[in-house]
Image: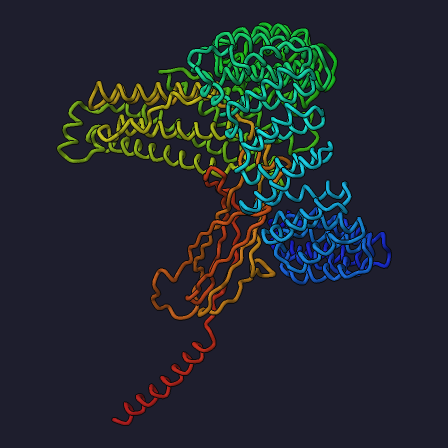
């Protein structure tokens, strides 16, 4: 990875050596070696994505393009198209274009065609180059077909980027399309250029008129299809004509007898339904319903239902029901859309039936204010019928339909909980007879339903255990996947703790028919669901089955963490001595685990989130233990009844909670220290949250709950002991309406509410609160929080999204320890460039909107005179926000170094996501600057010193001459 810990200089040498290696290949006399060198450039760009290298590489490629043969030019063209996002990093654009453009004057039409395509691929960086515009316009009149096609490609790309070019070429394109001399196949290629004529309203309007003429003048199938599709794309870009376009497409769908035209109309309607569902009027949806009811063709009916099912999940469906004439009088069943969906629910084509039930589900979910009881029943019956049909079939089509069905079931149960019982019963009934592929999907669905409605979970357990025993001895991949899915549902269903019978069955099956990876995945799920005893046994069994010591230490750390959490399940209210011993035992295991976890980390995988999370958990347990000890100390040293009165008269608030003695004061100070410690822990949890940009929402919610538990305890200490009068309950009141995602969150929230109620009632009943009641309340709150088994969420085990930022600073020293020399009367222009690097699933949970760069400098060592300087000149503090384009960003800072000496400059980056939330992702880069005195000031200073020296000698002589 670029700019790794080794420092920028060393990595730069790596990049240069890689470039020199490819350059050697380009200069080879053999064509094969030259081509091999050219096609290896995209990999180089990916590895070293900074402008200094990319600029050099593209200039070398432009040289090859200028002097090479057509095959080499074609290779360079392909490399340019593959590396389109790196084009804007070319610094010498003029030089690059000059070398490429020289080939346009060749006598070879193929060379000219490749050059045109090259120019078209570079349109994003040279949109307003008039010589390129002129060459494209000229080549459109060429007699060589290859050159004309290349000119069309370039014209389309330039039209998309440049308003001037689009305005200039529009008339030329329309003349060619309407000209009788232009062959039809060329017209078909020219028409799509018009989709880019959306830069202003008049241009878009004239393009629409031309397309309207073409649709009527050329009624052939191919021509109508290309023109209509261009029409749709132009409307989607210019936005103003979308309602007209929807009407036009519906008209063709209804009146044109050709199936190909109808298919295209459906495809374009789907595009507009996804892009702008709010522009669909009730009449549009009604017309589409009528066409679907009347068509005899299943393929077309399926397409129309696909558009309607897309619309049914958006705002359009509410408009359809609310703007109906006499809506109040009509029932939901009398609408054509509902009739169509009910008719299709039991269709012999699976796809049509799936869209039918999806429409009914979406109507039930989004129109909750209406009386839709019959519709809900229809949706449930339709879903059950599809479930029976698809769970027996192993084909890919059936699996896709089953996924839609199960998604609809989860959605329906979420918004209509009273339907959940029948849905779960039908799923459990089908589980036994279904195919393995279907069983896996159905288990995922059951787990999702059980998470939302834990009331249903206990009822599932018997059926699930029966199925788990029957899975069989085969060790196929599907069976392994099914074991994991079923175990997950069992863990979700047995909410409190696993019985010994369930554990035995799971372990037996794992011994009989599973590999180590399956056992690890089941253990991971047990850790996520808080079943730590099961997880510990599974991790223990896997320790000897791994090939590397890093994996061994990782599993060992997980085993220790599970054992630590298992120790905390034995806590009991009002038994504080056993609570202290349980916490001590847990801490012992956690310390062993963190040592293993540190040993499991590698430079490529530092496990920073895991280490941070576990260290915070250790500190939290220590803080809880300390709090219980402090409360116990207060019990053994009870304050007298008059403590409050004396404290009030003496004016010392802290004396209120104990004897007017050193011991009581010490305990009060300990309480204050304890409160500050919990607040500090809450801040650290907040920092961990902010640094976890790639974490899934469940993991982030888990970190948030830990933070809230710290704040809750600190608030309780303040409200009960330190400052009962000023403690406010408003900011801590729970928002019970918020949707709870997991059982862990549900239990934590109930503990929070219970503790807050206890504290508030104590404050209201007894003012001031007696020491005994407050101690009991605090200790019980700690025990209640610890009794909820900790959930180790997905991000602890698995990183689905990976985002990192690499920074390069210029000027940068060859050796990282060397300082950069700057004169103190000049400013340093620090250029910061960066590249955003993604894993296999970029933007899965959140996307980077902008990058925030913070530059600060601190004076490390001073050289020169020690005179006083204003504090403003001592440091530089600047911040800039930049939006990455094609994952690249750059900006500059001007820094002052007035004071002579060595300054330490730190550049830190953080990212801002699309919701405006700041994430402290790093990295942090440091360079040193040495501020030197400028020569003129130095000369003046030396002259002044030399002038002072003779006058001092003269004074000495006159003093001696007196004697």
- Where residue 923 sits in the image (x, y, percent)? 53, 47
- The quarter of the picture where residue 205 lies is top right
- The quarter of the picture where residue 542 lies is top right
Residue in the foreground of this view, choosing between 590 and 861: 861
Residue in the foreground of this view, choosing between 808 and 942: 808
From what the image shows, is residue 194 above or below residue 27? above
From what the image shows, is residue 286 above or below residue 827? above
- The quarter of the picture where residue 507 lies is top right
Q: Quadrant of the C terminus?
A: bottom left
Q: Is residue 510 visible?
A: no
Residue 665 located left or right of residue 612: left
Residue in the foreground of this view, choosing between 79 and 168: 168
- Where residue 364 sits in the image (x, y, percent)? 50, 15
Residue at 68% in and 6% down: 433
From what the image shows, is residue 504 above or below residue 915? above
Residue at 81% in and 58% down: 68
Q: Is residue 276 visible?
A: yes
From what the image shows, is residue 147 above or below residue 701? below
Residue at 64% in and 39% down: 211
Given the current orientation, which residue lies at the most extreme left position? 649
Residue at 25% in and 93% down: 962
State the scheme by which the image is colored. rainbow
Residue in the foreground of this view, choosing between 466 and 46: 46
- Where residue 631 sits in the image (x, y, percent)? 31, 25
- Where residue 122 sits in the image (x, y, percent)? 67, 52
């Amino acid at each position: 990875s670029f700019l790794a810990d080794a420092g920028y200089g060393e990595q730069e040498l790596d990049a240069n050596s890689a470039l020199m290696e490819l350059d050697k290949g380009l200069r080879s006399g053999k064509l094969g070696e030259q081509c091999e060198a050219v096609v290896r450039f995209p990999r180089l760009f990916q590895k070293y994505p900074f402008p200094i290298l990319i600029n050099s590489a593209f200039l070398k490629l432009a040289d090859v393009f200028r002097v090479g043969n057509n095959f080499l030019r074609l290779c360079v063209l392909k490399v340019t198209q593959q590396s389109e996002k790196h084009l804007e990093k070319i610094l010498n654009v003029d030089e690059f274009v000059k070398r490429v453009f020289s080939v346009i004057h060749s006598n070879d039409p193929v060379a000219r065609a490749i050059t045109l395509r090259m120019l078209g691929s570079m349109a994003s960086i040279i949109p307003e180059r008039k010589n390129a515009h002129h060459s494209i316009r000229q080549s459109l009149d060429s007699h060589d077909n290859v050159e004309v096609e290349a000119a069309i490609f370039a014209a389309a790309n330039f039209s998309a980027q440049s308003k001037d070019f689009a305005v200039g070429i529009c008339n030329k394109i329309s003349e060619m399309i309407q000209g009788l001399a232009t062959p039809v196949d060329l017209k078909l290629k020219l028409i799509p250029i018009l989709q880019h004529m959306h830069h202003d309203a008049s241009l878009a309007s004239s393009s629409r008129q031309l397309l309207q003429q073409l649709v009527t003048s050329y009624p052939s199938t191919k021509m109508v299809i290309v023109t209509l599709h261009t029409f749709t794309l132009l409307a989607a870009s210019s936005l103003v004509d979308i309602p007209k376009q929807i009407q036009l497409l519906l008209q063709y769908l209804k009146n044109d007898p050709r199936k190909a035209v109808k298919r295209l109309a459906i495809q374009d309607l789907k595009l507009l339904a996804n892009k702008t569902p709010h522009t669909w009027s009730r009449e549009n949806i009604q017309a589409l319903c009528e066409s679907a009811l009347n068509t005899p063709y299943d393929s077309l009916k399926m397409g129309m239902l696909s558009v309607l099912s897309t619309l049914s999940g958006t705002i359009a469906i509410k408009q359809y029901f609310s703007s109906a004439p006499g809506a109040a009088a009509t029932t939901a069943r009398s609408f054509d859309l509902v009739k169509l969906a009910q008719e299709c629910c039991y269709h012999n084509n699976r796809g049509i039936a799936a869209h039918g039930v999806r429409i009914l589900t979406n109507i039930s979910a989004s129109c909750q204010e209406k009386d839709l009881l019959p519709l809900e029943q229809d949706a449930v019956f339709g879903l059950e019928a599809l479930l029976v049909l698809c769970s027996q079939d192993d084909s890919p089509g059936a699996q896709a339909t089953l996924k839609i069905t199960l998604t609809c079931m989860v959605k329906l149960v979420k918004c209509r909980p009273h339907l959940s019982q029948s849905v779960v019963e039908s799923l459990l009934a089908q589980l036994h007879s279904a195919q393995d592929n279907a069983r896996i999907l159905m288990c995922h669905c059951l787990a999702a339903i059980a998470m939302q409605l834990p009331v249903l979970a206990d009822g599932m357990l018997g059926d699930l255990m029966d199925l788990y025993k029957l899975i069989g001895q085969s060790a196929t991949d599907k069976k392994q996947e099914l074991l994991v899915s079923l175990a997950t549902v069992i863990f979700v269903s047995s909410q409190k703790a696993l019985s010994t019978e369930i554990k035995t069955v799971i372990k037996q099956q794992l011994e009989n028919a599973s590999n180590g990876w399956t056992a690890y995945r089941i253990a991971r799920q047990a850790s996520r669901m808080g079943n730590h005893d099961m997880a510990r046994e599974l991790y223990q069994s896997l320790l000897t089955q791994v090939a590397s010591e890093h994996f061994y230490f990782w599993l060992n750390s997980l085993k220790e963490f599970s054992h630590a959490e298992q120790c905390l399940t034995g806590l009991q209210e009002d038994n504080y001595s056993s609570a202290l011993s349980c916490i001590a035992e847990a801490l012992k295991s956690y310390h062993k685990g963190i040592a293993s976890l540190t040993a499991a980390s590698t430079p490529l995988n530092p496990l920073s989130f895991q280490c941070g999370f576990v260290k915070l958990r250790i500190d939290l347990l220590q803080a809880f233990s300390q709090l219980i000890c402090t409360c116990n100390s207060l019990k053994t040293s009870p304050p007298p009844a008059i403590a409050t009165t004396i404290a009030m008269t003496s004016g010392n608030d802290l004396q209120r909670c104990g004897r007017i003695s050193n011991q009581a004061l010490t305990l009060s100070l300990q309480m204050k220290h304890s409160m500050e410690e919990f607040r500090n822990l809450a801040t650290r949890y907040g920092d961990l949250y902010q640094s976890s940009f790639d974490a899934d929402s469940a993991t982030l919610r888990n970190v948030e709950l830990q933070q809230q538990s710290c704040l809750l305890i600190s608030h309780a200490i303040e409200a009960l002991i330190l400052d009962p009068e000023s403690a406010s309950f408003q900011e801590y009141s729970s928002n019970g309406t918020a949707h709870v995602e997991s059982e862990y969150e549900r239990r934590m929230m109930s503990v929070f509410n219970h503790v807050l109620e206890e504290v508030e009632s104590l404050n209201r009943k007894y003012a001031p609160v007696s020491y005994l009641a407050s101690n009991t309340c605090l200790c019980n709150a700690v025990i209640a929080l610890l009794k909820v088994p900790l959930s180790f969420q997905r991000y602890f085990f698995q990183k689905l999204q990976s985002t990192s930022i690499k920074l390069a600073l210029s000027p940068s020293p060859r050796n990282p320890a060397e300082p950069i020399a700057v004169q103190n009367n000049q400013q340093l222009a620090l250029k910061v460039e960066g590249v955003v690097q993604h894993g296999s699933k970029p933007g899965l949970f959140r996307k980077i909107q902008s990058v925030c760069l913070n530059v600060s400098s601190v004076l490390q060592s001073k050289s020169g005179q020690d005179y006083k300087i204003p504090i403003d000149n001592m440091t530089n503090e600047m911040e800039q926000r930049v939006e990455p384009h094609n994952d690249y960003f750059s900006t500059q800072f001007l820094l002052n170094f007035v004071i002579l000496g060595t300054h330490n400059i730190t550049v830190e980056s953080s990212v801002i996501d699309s919701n405006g939330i700041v994430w402290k992702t790093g990295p942090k880069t440091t360079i040193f600057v040495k501020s030197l005195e400028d020569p003129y000031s130095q000369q003046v200073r030396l002259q002044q010193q030399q002038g002072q020296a003779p006058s001092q000698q003269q004074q000495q002589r006159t003093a001696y001459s007196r004697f």
